[in-house]
Amino acid sequence: MLPRLLIITRNYPPQTGGLENYSFNLIRELRRQLPLRVIALSRGKRHLVWFLPFALAVGLASARLGSAPRIHLCDGLLAPIGCVLKWFSRSRVSASVHGLDVTFAHPLYEKFIPFCLKRLDQIVCVSRSTRDECLKRGIAAERCVVIPNGIHPEEIYLAGDRCDLMREVEISLGRSFAGKRVLVTVGRLVKRKGVQWFVEQVLPQLGADYAYIVVGTGPEFAGIQETVRRRNLQDRVVLAGRQPDHLRNCLLNAADAFIMPNICVPGDVEGFGIAALEAGACGLPVIAAGIQGIRDAVIDGVTGHWVAERDVGGFVSRIRSLNLDRTRIRRVVGETYSWKKIGRAYAGLLAAGDEAITWKG
């Protein structure tokens, strides 16, 4: 059978990152349900110089031969390719957008990419916040649908005793957290994540019985480290850097709360917040700034709590009074955000005809 759906992605393993994970999982799920052909870049960004014309040439050939009546692009940067494919074929072309690929603050990018996105048949937004950013840029509301990101809960959840899992964490990090409630953040340390603000403003208000473990690296690492030193919090904050997945999973299953203290940074939005789902898959409640795409990743009062941006008292109060049911968190996250469910939503959308423009998943 000839492929009926063509997927183009510039981010694919063994490259690592959020877009790579998204592309891999989307393609894996779609292959189970639809005839599929994939054009994927699995090398570094410097290879884009040949990959983009190659993807365009193969896409045009597939579309003109009639073997790809539907084409889907895995991020907004590929929208120019989508425009050309539409102009020279009868294929329906759609694209997923994630946040920064819509809002990236560069004068040329801000004009060109939205111009191209407007001309595609459909835009799949990973959150309502990302959809709002599309609408601000003149993309028609009827062309935008929301399908959230997904996870594989069974790959993150560990059934062991929480105390045993925490002992693994203590051995790996060379620190004891006995008698402390453990807060954790996992992610790339950039300004919008708000980790430095949390260490500076919130953690000193919580008292000595709270410890904070930060897993990840990034441009804010040195600034956070300096804040820890200046606030004399070395005995309560562990900047763990990059860690293997197993240690991260132990921590997510053993800790007391996951912290997402994001702050608004012009031109750099949180398109969704996959880390909140990973925490929820382990039953770990999330205390998060209720901004941008985080509001689609955290179900307020069920899988965690929203707090106003930069609200010190709000974070302190929610952390101290946290009593959400961990079993319920796991169940809700698994039912709502599993890649199996998300894959079915994409398959239903991408297999449909013209009526798919008004799909409301």
Image: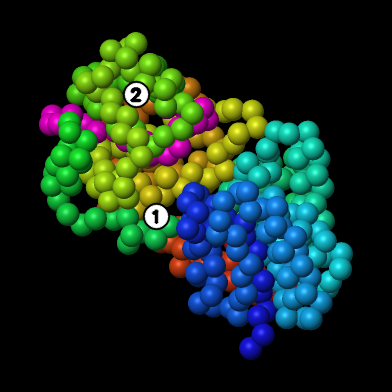
Of the 4 image quadrants, the one containing the C terminus is: bottom right
Describe the colour scheme in one phrase: rainbow
Q: How many marks?
A: 2
What label sits on residue 304 in the rendered view?
Answer: none
Of the 4 image quadrants, the one containing the N terminus is: bottom right
Against 47, is 232 above or below?
Answer: above
Which residue is denoted by mark 1 in the rendering?
A: 333
Residue at point 64% right, 28% down?
266
Kind of residue at disc 1: Val
Residue at point 50% right, 34% down?
290
* Label 1 close to label 2 by CB (< 8 Å): no
Secondary structure beneath disc 2? helix
Residue at point 59% right, 36% down?
269
Question: At which x and y percent is residue 83?
Answer: 81, 59
Report the span colored magenta.
176-195
Secondary structure beneath disc 1? helix
Residue at point 62% right, 74% down?
37
Quick check: is 360 in the magenta stretch? Answer: no
Direction from residue 13 to residue 65 in the image, left or right: right
Direction from residue 269 to residue 185 in the image, left or right: left
Quick check: is 186 in the magenta stretch? Answer: yes
Direction from residue 306 to residue 84 in the image, left or right: right
Question: At which x and y percent is residue 124?
Answer: 65, 57
What label sits on residue 316 in the rendered view?
Answer: 2
